[in-house]
Amino acid sequence: MADSPGATAAGPSPTKETDCGTCVCAGHCARHCPERVSAIRTEGAVRVACATGIENPPKDVASIIDHTLLKPDATEADVRKLCDEARRYTFASVCINPSWVRLSKQLLTGTRVKVCTVVGFPLGATSSESKAAETHQAVTDGADEIDMVINVGALKAKDDARALEDIKAVVRAAKGHIVKVILETGLLTDEEKKRGCELSVEAGADFVKTSTGFGPGGATVADIELMRHTVGPKVGVKASGGVRDFETARKMIAAGATRIGASASVAIVKGSKGEGPTAAAGKGY
């Protein structure tokens, strides 16, 4: 698995009594205020609970955004612009279709920006062998992260063995690179979303992700909360589909998202800095 993708961004360490309410990371009290935890236990507590998300997003919100361009008519000029913006704002990654992986890798060499691509996209209905082959090619071309679409039909049919092996095939082919499993939550019941998360964790995926942006619906706070609760703190949760402004991104992060997928990334960052609208930024992934 990747380096603690489920961990939320750490805030400043509490240093005095009044700082206790400013913790923004699950587990801060145990790490930075062990004496307070000890005092609580002395009073009889056997477990200390905390929220799964963070109320305030990291100051550098760009660092958790996958700057996304997945439209079928994207041109080389569009991809070059995407990578230029990613360099300028230092996004976590660019998320592009497989045919653009090599170019994106060349354009982003020497930066901290990763190259993310999609597999079995957008339907998830290709064979596991095809998904594994796509993954192998993507990694060979320079992809750092793989966003695969789960076999939605298998999941809905309760064919857990098939859905599990489908994810495992991609994880194996990724050879240690980050794998995110797109559930396409708009097509699933809550029980199916939970089972998709559980299978993703069992298969060794690093993240679960809400949507392709091409199916019905997109990321919702309720789905992010459900997914975070299901996968626990060690697996990442990516909110994608309809996250077009800072206010929406903030809500997703507070609900437990550790990565945001968006085409309106620049607008989100500007909104976080008060340089543009914080809501209703417009259309996009």
Image: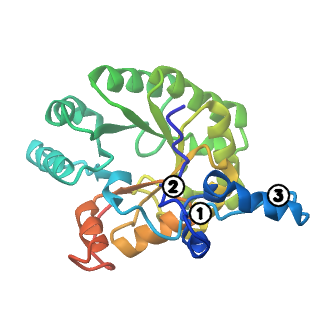
What residue type is disc 3 on? Arg
Q: Quadrant of residue 166?
A: top right
**Residue 285, horizontal then vertical, whole percent:** 33, 60
Q: Secondary structure at mark 3?
A: loop
The reply to whether dot 2 and dot 1 touch (C-beta < 8 Å) is yes
In the rendered image, which residue does mark 3 sit on? 47
- 137 or 128, nearer to the observer: 137
Is the C-beta separation of discs 1 and 3 under 8 Å? no
Name the image quarter holding the N terminus: top right
* Residue type, label 1: Asp
* Picture layout, residue 136 above or below residue 76: above
Q: Earlier in the sequence, mark 1 or mark 3?
A: 3
- Report the mark closest to the observer, 1 or 3: 3
Instruction: Say above or below: 118 vs 261.
Output: above
Residue 220 makes an appearance in the image:
no
User: Which residue in the structure is indicated by mark 1?
Assistant: 223
Density class for disc 2 (Cα within 10 Å; few <14, some 14-19, many ≥20) is many
Q: CA distance from mark 1 to mark 3?
A: 26 Å
Residue drawn at 23 percent across, 63 percent down:
266
Residue 187: percent from left, percent from top:
57, 58
- Viewed as shown, does residue 84 lie left or right of 34? left
* Disc assigned to residue 110: none
Cα–Cα span, label 3 and label 2: 31 Å
* Residue that badge 2 annotates: 210
- Which of discs 3 and 2 lies nearer the camera? The answer is 3
